[in-house]
């Protein structure tokens, strides 16, 4: 009601809606179907209500709210910040530990849950027919959050977040976060990077993951860049130090599968240039021209970084791109200000975050390019290529639609 600007439930009508940048939370109980088969209908409802009653405060205390319950699943909305959604997720896992202690005392098996988070623009509003309406959220951001929740089962981890959540966190370094995979979402050309938050792991596993994080991410970078031999060697060393890591085991199986079949379970575009096309246009001549130039400059940056032999060569190449990015951001923000674009602040925040992350990447390139070339080229893909492609195809295109409506 507050989001829609309504004073009463009776004021809400079909079609009432608002578009907001929000973080969507999907959670689900693992293996609920088989779990429920061992209970009577009454026991199932009692179990579900006890579980949901325990989880509900975690969302409200973190300034979110529950849009709906989907059987044993929860769809939560966080309109203020991605940090709120991640805080709620960690609180849910903490509450789950207490809930499982009670279950063990009664002789019932513990349960596990998976949580997927994504940040993006979505429509919140009222849908339905002549006899029943309900509020809901609709959009690509919602679909990706649901997909991430499903992927928690694949990797055996409790929390997965999208790159959009990662880049929206105020202080991502205050959490234990690592890259896990790249996935293609139905209907979208640009692959999405997926990250695990392992703050809630048992202390021993969390410490082992933290200590060997660089080796783990380097192994995954080599896998995605198709250096399977190097990836397999690194994963063997990593699993010797952290044998309980389920994600590493998934990648070890992928390497073995590739060795047998030659099938690479990746998105396939790593190392390829980003291509400007008609679908990138927002129909503002100045911005479209700069976007086209920006894609070309990013491709040139990646190509030349591949040939760098000395750390001293990194800075001028990075500065070349950095200057143009700043010039482009300033142009975009000026035009958005002139047109009265309501999401200008969100654009400014994303631009500022990119500049900060790019500066940090530049420092890393100077230190690690010579010794960890594949890993650093992969990081360029994740931060520079992916970020600019996603930003252009999503938030900038939203501005284009705004201009058309205006």
Image: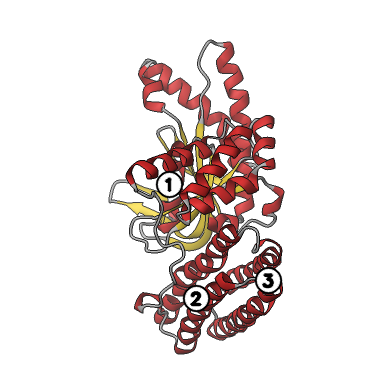
Name the side, left or right, on which 129 lies relative to 401.
left
The location of residue 275, given as percent across then percent down, is 41, 75
Q: Which residue is disc 1 drawn over? A: 146
Label number found at residue 299: 2
Question: Which label sits in the foreground, 1 or 3?
Answer: 3
Residues under numbered marks 1 and 3 in contact, where contact means CB atoms less than 8 Å apart: no
Question: Which label sits in the foreground, 3 or 2?
Answer: 3
Q: Which residue is disc 3 drawn over? A: 310
For disc 3, the neighbor class at 10 Å (few under 14, some 14 to 19, many from 20) is: few
For marks 1 and 3, the one nearer the N-term is 1
Query: Which quadrant, please, contains the C terminus?
Result: bottom left
For marks 2 and 1, the one nearer the N-term is 1
Question: Separation of disc 1 and disc 3 at Cα?
Answer: 44 Å
Above or below — where is 402 with respect to 160? below
Above or below — where is 317 with respect to 140? below
The residue sitting at 60% across, 68% down in the picture is: 350
The location of residue 364, given as percent across then percent down, is 69, 63
Above or below — where is 344 with respect to 168? below
Question: Separation of disc 3 and disc 2 at Cα?
Answer: 20 Å
The residue sitting at 51% across, 29% down in the picture is: 112
Question: Separation of disc 2 and disc 1 at Cα?
Answer: 32 Å
* Residue 93 occupies quadrant: top right
Question: Which label sits in the foreground, 2 or 1?
Answer: 2
What secondary structure is found at the residue carrying circle 2?
A: helix
For disc 1, the neighbor class at 10 Å (few under 14, some 14 to 19, many from 20) is: many
What secondary structure is found at the residue carrying circle 3?
A: loop
């Amino acid at each position: 009601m507050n989001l829609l600007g309504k004073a009463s439930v009776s004021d809400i009508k079909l079609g009432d809606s608002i578009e907001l940048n929000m973080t969507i939370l999907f959670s689900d109980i693992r293996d609920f179907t088989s779990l429920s088969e061992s209970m009577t209908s009454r026991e199932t409802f009692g179990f579900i209500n006890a579980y949901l009653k325990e989880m509900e405060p975690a969302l409200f205390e973190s300034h979110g709210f529950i849009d709906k319950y989907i059987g044993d699943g929860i769809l939560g909305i966080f309109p203020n910040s991605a940090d709120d959604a991640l805080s709620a997720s960690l609180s849910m896992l903490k509450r789950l530990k207490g809930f499982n202690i009670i279950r063990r005392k009664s002789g019932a098996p513990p349960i596990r849950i998976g949580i997927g988070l994504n940040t993006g623009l979505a429509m919140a509003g009222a849908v339905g027919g002549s006899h029943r309406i309900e509020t809901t959220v609709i959009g690509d951001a919602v679909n990706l959050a649901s997909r991430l929740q499903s992927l928690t089962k694949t990797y055996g981890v409790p929390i997965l977040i999208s790159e959009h959540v990662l880049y929206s966190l105020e202080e991502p370094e205050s959490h234990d976060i690592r890259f896990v995979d790249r996935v293609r979402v139905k209907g979208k050309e640009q692959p999405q990077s997926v990250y695990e938050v392992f703050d809630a792991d048992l202390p021993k596993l969390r410490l082992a993951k933290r200590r060997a994080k660089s080796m783990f991410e380097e192994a995954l970078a080599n896998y995605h860049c198709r250096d399977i031999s190097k990836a397999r060697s690194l994963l063997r060393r990593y699993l010797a130090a952290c044998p309980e890591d389920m994600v590493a085991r998934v990648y070890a199986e992928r390497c073995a599968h590739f060795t047998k079949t030659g099938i690479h379970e990746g998105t396939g575009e790593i190392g390829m240039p980003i291509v400007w096309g008609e679908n990138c246009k927002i129909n503002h001549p100045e911005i479209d021209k700069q976007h086209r130039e920006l894609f070309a400059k990013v491709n040139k940056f990646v190509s030349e970084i591949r040939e760098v032999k000395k750390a001293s060569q990194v800075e001028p190449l990075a500065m070349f791109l950095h200057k143009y990015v700043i010039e482009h951001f300033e142009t975009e923000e000026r035009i958005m200000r002139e047109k009265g674009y309501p999401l200008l602040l969100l654009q400014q925040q994303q631009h500022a975050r990119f500049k900060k992350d790019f500066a940090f990447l530049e420092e890393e390139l100077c230190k690690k390019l010579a010794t960890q070339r594949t890993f650093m080229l992969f990081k360029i893909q994740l931060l520079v290529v992916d970020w600019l492609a996603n930003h252009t195809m999503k938030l900038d295109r939203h501005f284009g639609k705004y201009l058309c409506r205006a």
